[in-house]
Every structure is written in C-alpha cells, then in structure tokens.
Image: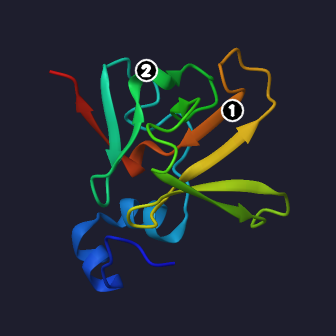
Amino acid sequence: MSYEVQKSDAEWRAQLSPEEYHVLREAGTERPFVGEYTDTKTVGVYACRACGAELFSSETKFDSHCGWPSYYAPLAGDSVEYLEDTSLGMRRVEVRCKNCGSHLGHVFEGEGYGTPTDQRYCINSISLTLKPAE
C-alpha cells in the first residue's frame, strides 16, 4: 500500500517507543485493561500516535468492558482501512490508519452492543493520542 506518511523502519523505531512500535508497526496487541484510554471519558478526538491523523471521536466511544477502548464508528469513513486478519486461526478484520498504515486494532460486528452501527472498533490505547476538546 502507498500511504501519505511513509517512513523507513529505522525512522519508525526512532520515533516510537518499543511498545508503540510493536503494536503500530508489527500489529501487536497491548494487554487488556492496562491502556491509558480504556476508561477515559474525556471529550475530544483520538488521533493516530504514529502520524497524528484524526481517527475516532469521544462521541462514538462506549463502554464495552472488553479491556480496550471501543468505538462504534471511525471519525470519518475514510480515515481507516480494513484488512483480513487470520493470524490467530480465526477470521478478524484488522483496522489500520489509512494515513500511515499503522495497526490500530480490530472491528467486530453483531455482538449485541446497543450502538447505532452494531460494530465495536476494539482499538489499542497505545496506538492513539487523545486531543482533548477546548
């Protein structure tokens, strides 16, 4: 894929902490219930930690009690991209930043949450930066 923000592996490693690099660039996952935004209620916009692209709004964040921040929709339909992920022997839909290709998490459907989209964007806190509303 060709992304607006492109950096070498060395540049990403220099910019990101080892934990951030593992999640954002190697499609890792942070442990559940430890992320800084899991229970955050602050009003604002969540941006990609790697490139700063705005991805999710606090207005679509909801309590899913799954251990990671959850949203029912991205900020704009074209702010994220989707890839098929069969890495754990099951079919999941990976969510990446469309601006830089960084791994954010996964999206799930049909779980019965009372959200307008019936979707749960299960996103790693470490892949985001919260920009509080003024």
Residue labelled with disc 2: 59
Residue 54, x across and y down, in percent: 33, 44
The residue carrying pointer 1 sits among few (fewer than 14), some (14 to 19) or many (20 or more) residues within 10 Å by Cα, namely: some
| Relative to 124, residue 51 above or below | below
Q: Which mark is residue 119?
A: 1
Residue 16, x across and y down, in percent: 28, 65
Image point 25% across, 80% down: which residue? 11
- Is 132 or 26 nearer to us in this picture? 132
The part of the image, by quadrant, that contains residue 115 is top right
Asked whether, in this view, residue 114 is left or right of residue 16, the answer is right
* Circle 1: element type: strand
* Circle 2: element type: helix
Residue type marked 1? Gln
Image point 79% across, 21% down: which residue? 112
User: Could you tell me how far apart the alpha carbons at marks 1 and 2 are, in whole angstroms?
Assistant: 14 Å
| Relative to 73, residue 31 above or below | below
| Relative to 63, residue 122 above or below | below
- Is 66 or 104 nearer to us in this picture? 104
Image point 30% across, 75% down: which residue? 13
Extreme residue in the left direction: 134
